Image: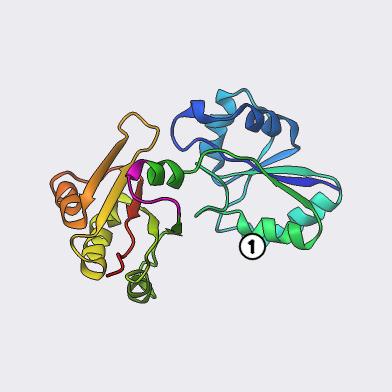
């Protein structure tokens, strides 16, 4: 019987790769990668010569059964995403679930994921929090925002640069202009930045400075009156 390893990869700084992650990627039979071009650069950097196979949101449904069968026949896989931990706003859940249902061992290594440093660095309460990932783009967005307006725990979101201003504007509308927020971008990279303040203050900052990079937004929960 084979096995599936879920292996986190750096979110920016290549030195955040763990020694164990390198060892696993060298020892497995195949590395499943969200984008083989992106992951190919990482593997080359660490002199990892394991074969790469594409596995992403557009083909994972078709591949799951075949991968499960190969693991039953003894093949060991490592799954990586472009950055961070697989299955956190990235492919990985479907294959993991299928392995669990078929009694195939799954092991997830600890490692990089963007929301943890952003949350800890925000200065907002992190003893209890909810991870929301990306909000719905259209259908269900308003419903979700109305529900989250009542959330008392700190909330964590992912957002792309071209949707950041829209999302912050919606936060001001649904959560209130004075709701505390912390926006981190380009974590672990050269131009890493965290902007903290009220939703209005942070929105003004990015209205004056065009958003660039990938963003993690941390929002304070509703205060009980």
Identify the secondary structure beneath mark 1. Answer: helix
- Horizontal and vertical percent position of residue 135: 39, 64
Query: x and y percent of residue 136 in the render?
Result: 39, 67
Residue occupying the point 56% across, 47% down: 34
Label 1: few (<14), some (14–19) or many (≥20) C-alpha neighbours in 10 Å: few
Q: Which residues are magenta?
A: 121-127
Residue 202: give x, y in percent of width and height: 20, 50
Which residue is disc 1 drawn over? Answer: 61
The front one of 183 and 102 is 183
Q: Main secondary structure of the magenta part?
A: loop
Give the residue at x 16% y 56%: 200
- Residue name at image x 52 percent, y 39 percent: 112
Residue 69 as seen in the image, left or right of residue 92: right
Q: Is residue 85 above or below residue 129?
A: above
Q: Residue at x 80, y 53 (%)?
A: 104
Residue 222 counted in the magenta span:
no
Residue 43 in percent (x, y) is at 59, 30
123 part of magenta stretch: yes
């Amino acid at each position: 019987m084979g096995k599936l390893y879920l292996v986190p990869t750096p979110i920016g700084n290549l030195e955040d790769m763990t020694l164990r992650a390198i060892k696993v990627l060298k020892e497995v039979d195949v590395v499943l990668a969200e984008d083989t071009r992106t992951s190919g650069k990482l593997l080359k950097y660490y002199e990892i010569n394991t074969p790469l196979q594409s596995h992403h949101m557009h083909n994972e449904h078709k591949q799951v059964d075949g991968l499960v069968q190969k693991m039953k026949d003894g093949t060991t896989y490592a799954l990586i995403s472009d950055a961070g931990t697989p299955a956190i706003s990235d492919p990985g859940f479907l294959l993991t679930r299928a392995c669990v249902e078929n009694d195939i061992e799954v092991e997830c290594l600890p490692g990089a994921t963007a929301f943890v440093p952003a949350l800890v660095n925000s200065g907002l309460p992190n003893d209890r929090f909810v991870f929301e990932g990306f909000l719905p783009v259209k259908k269900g967005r308003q419903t979700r925002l109305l529900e989250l307006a009542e959330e008392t725990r700190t909330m964590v979101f992912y957002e792309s640069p071209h949707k950041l201003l829209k999302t912050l504007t919606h936060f001001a509308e649904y959560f209130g202009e004075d709701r505390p927020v912390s926006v981190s971008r380009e974590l672990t990279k050269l131009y890493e930045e965290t902007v903290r303040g009220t939703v209005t203050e942070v929105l003004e900052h990015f209205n004056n400075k065009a958003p660039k990079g990938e963003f993690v937004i941390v929002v304070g929960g509703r205060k009980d009156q």
